Amino acid sequence: MNISKICITVFQQCVRDYHVHHHVDRPIANPYEANSFEYLLYLKNHIDTVQWHLEDIVRDPNINPLEGIALKRRIDKSNQERTDLVEKIDDYFLEKYKEVVPAIDAKINSESPAWAIDRLSILELKMWHMQEEVTRQEADETHRQKCKVKLSVLLDQQVDLSTSIDELLMDIEAGRKKMKVYRQMKMYNDPSLNPVLYHLAQKQS
């Protein structure tokens, strides 16, 4: 089975599982063997799915400001966890292809396999929620038809992105492209790199 098909299968399962209870605070029940590729995919999509709904909640215009700040910080933490998971998935591919010797003229892709898979995870969420809008009975027909068109575009995007991921991995395996990863090095969550945080620490010391 192609990697993209494995990803889509796991992502769709995770999105379905979440919507059984539909609560951002419900603990994850990852059905896969710990630290397997599928386990990482399921965990990745679970983070994306919870964050998707946190982003909905925080946009409530009547939200309590303190609750809104707490949610924003939770979303920031989720973003860091998402980045860490993507890098773990890239570690999986680095290990898988460590024996491959790239050709002399091998090229470097603009993004790593895991960051392309990250986009596929988000795409599955978009498709799930767009499908909800297509069938939402209280919405008018114009709304449903617009969402149906958008869903069609998302389905095309899924095919194209899946093909791109599989072709990238085939090129890496064949040595036509180099498996090279640049870490994100996010600065705003690091107290040694965020000037607001390290200046605050200096004042408190």
Image: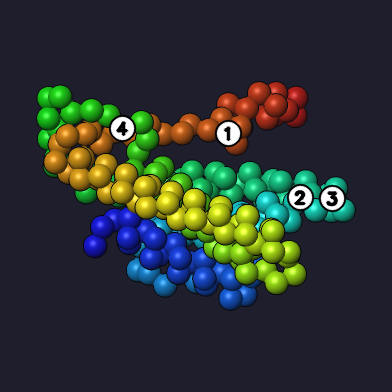
The residue tagged 3 is 61
Q: Counting residues from the N terminus, which is met first, the one under dot 1 or under dot 3? A: 3
Label 2 and label 3: CA atoms lie apart by 6 Å
Number of other residues with Cα within 10 Å of mark 2, as a class: few under 14, some 14 to 19, many 20 or more = few
Q: Counting residues from the N terminus, which is met first, the one under dot 1 or under dot 2? A: 2
User: Which mark, by number, is residue 109?
Assistant: 4
Measuring 15% from the left and 24% from the top, which residue is drawn there?
105
Q: Is residue 32 left or right of residue 134?
A: left
SS at circle 3: loop
Rendering quarter of residue 192: top right
Label 1 and label 2: CA atoms lie apart by 26 Å
- Amino acid under label 1? Asp
Tag 2 and tag 3, C-beta contact below 8 Å: yes
Q: Is residue 105 left or right of residue 56?
A: left
Asked if residue 89 can be seen in this view, the reply is no
Tag 1 and tag 2, C-beta contact below 8 Å: no
Measuring 57% from the left and 59% from the top, which residue is drawn there?
148
The residue tagged 1 is 190
